Amino acid sequence: MTEPKDKLIVALDVDTFEEARILVDSLGSVVNIFKVGSQLFTACGPVVVRYILVRGKKVFLDLKFHDIPNTVANAIRAAVNLSVAVHEIIESSGKKNEINDGIFMCTVHTMGGKEMLERAVEAAAQQAQSVGVIKPLLVGITVLTSEASTNNMSALVLERARLAKECGLSGVVASSHEAKLIRQELGDDFIIVTPGIRPSGAGENDQKRVMTPREAARMGSDFLVVGRPIVKAENPVLATKKILEEISQVN
């Protein structure tokens, strides 16, 4: 049975490496996976990814690649390569067993189309084999949780999820409102990552389609992404523990 801390992804949506470092160090005892998105990666680049890896934690690289197929394939290769320098550091210090093998998960936009998605999957597999790391899970962005629901939202999300599976992706990023449908249609081995998670009593901010951790887990989401309710909390560790407790209540 998956432990709650293996389902929770803390989004490091902060401006500086120092803010991210403090969060990783303070939450390391209760969290295994950290998300690095466009905000933090633009601010300090690969250094934050490599720091998380050196700390023995998993990285969800959420850069939502969406471009021509060749450009996306090259970006995926570069993402896989982010672990290479870390391996060299660990090997030289004689502590290789303290590092996770490469990027854990990475996002691409399903709107990029079939060829782009297939090239991304191929590039991830080839580069991981080339540098000797575990191939990252590739998950496709369906519809952003900041978009308001429409009458055809579920059909649109399911269409894009089917395309992702057809192209060989490991899963999708989707609102918890569509998670149950995706699970029913595409099976238990298809990963569902759900952002827009807000603990009971928390504000929605700019998210339109949100759920509590307990509700999202019940709908079938494999991973729950939480940012502001943790990183902006007065006590991030306590806030995290409360969310983990909510997740643990799901049978």
Image: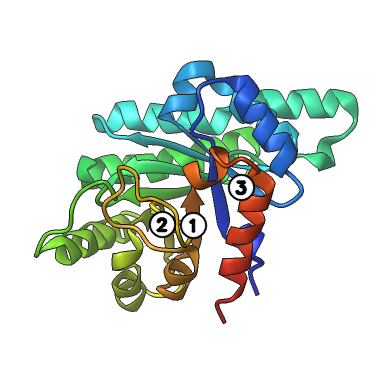
Reading the image, the residue beneath label 3 is 33
- CA gap, disc 1 and disc 3: 10 Å
Work out whether 5 lies above or below 56: below
Secondary element under disc 1, as helix, strand or loop, is strand
Secondary element under disc 3, as helix, strand or loop, is strand
**Residue 217 percent coordinates (x, y):** 48, 69
Question: Which corner quadrant holds the C terminus?
Answer: bottom right
Amino acid under label 1? Leu
Residue lying at 55% horizontally and 77% vertically, measured from the top left: 250
Q: Is residue 120 left or right of residue 232?
A: left
Amino acid under label 3? Ile
Reading the image, the residue beneath label 2 is 194
**Residue 123 percent coordinates (x, y):** 43, 37
Residue 80: name its quadrant.
top right
Q: Which residue lies furthest to the left in this view?
A: 151
Asked if one can make out residue 227 in the rendered structure from this viewpoint, the answer is: no
